[in-house]
Amino acid sequence: MGWTYTTRPSGQSIRDFFAEEFRHGDDASVVDCASRLREAYIAYRTKRGAIIAIACLLEHKPFRGYNLGYKDMDEGMGPGICRCPARILDLLSPVEEYFEGQALEWARCWRERCRAWNAKMESARAVGAGTLVKFKAPIQFGDWGAFDTFKRLKDLRYPGRLFRDRFLEITQNVVVRLPGWREREFEIVKGG
């Protein structure tokens, strides 16, 4: 249940790396892969023909011999990371085809958490510039106080820089950045 560190050739994609790493003859193979900076989600065809999900935590070490570390967990282990894209989830076989007992419940729960995360990201796409958003839990800003209602501002581009996730706190009239706002619970008060 530890980490595996290995060398990934320069220029090799994460998908190609895992296709090679998880190849077990012609029977078991990677069907598809989606990766983020520190996470990868793999649709994997088992020797029995079922397609299951494998979630991997990633650690990139670009200036070392062993330049990639990963910790792989199949969905039956109930991984803590649950940002698997819908395109990978849609490829998977029903959990009953591969898992049983506690692993079956963990796999179901993991898929539900991933679907919920995808739904949350979909609702966040509706929050464009000018949209008034109220967060369920107020966000603390040091000694300024805690605020829950913000107006989304458009992203700013300067030469060589992009300022994203900017909001206007409406009571103090202060511009703030809210990285990770999409993962918080919110409601749209007024569309943009």
Image (cartoon, rainbow, N blue to C red):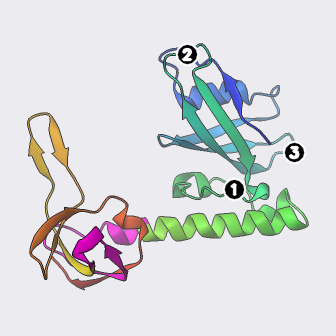
Q: Is residue 19 left or right of residue 124?
A: right
Sequence-wise first label, 2 or 3 = 3
| Vertical arrangement, residue 59 with respect to residue 124, above or below | above
Q: Secondary structure at mark 1?
A: loop
Position above or below: 63 against 156: above
| Comes first in the chain, label 1 or label 3 | 3
Amino acid type of the residue that numbered disc 1 sits on in the rendered structure: Pro
How far apart are the alpha carbons under marks 2 and 3? 37 Å
Q: Look at mark 3 in the image and give the residue it sits on.
A: 48
Q: Which residues are magenta?
A: 121-145
| Residue at point 54%, 57% (across, down) | 83
Residue 30 rendering spot, x and y as whole percentages: 68, 36
Q: In what element is the residue under mark 2?
A: loop
* Placement of 164 over or under 20, stated as above or below: below
Q: Earlier in the sequence, mark 2 or mark 1?
A: 2
User: In percent of the image, x 80 and y 69: which residue is there?
Assistant: 105
**On screen, 144 above or below 83?**
below
Relative depth, front residue between 125 and 64:
64
Q: What amino acid is labelled 3 in the image?
A: Arg
Q: Which mark is residue 79?
A: 1
Q: Nearer the viewer, mark 2 or mark 3?
A: 2
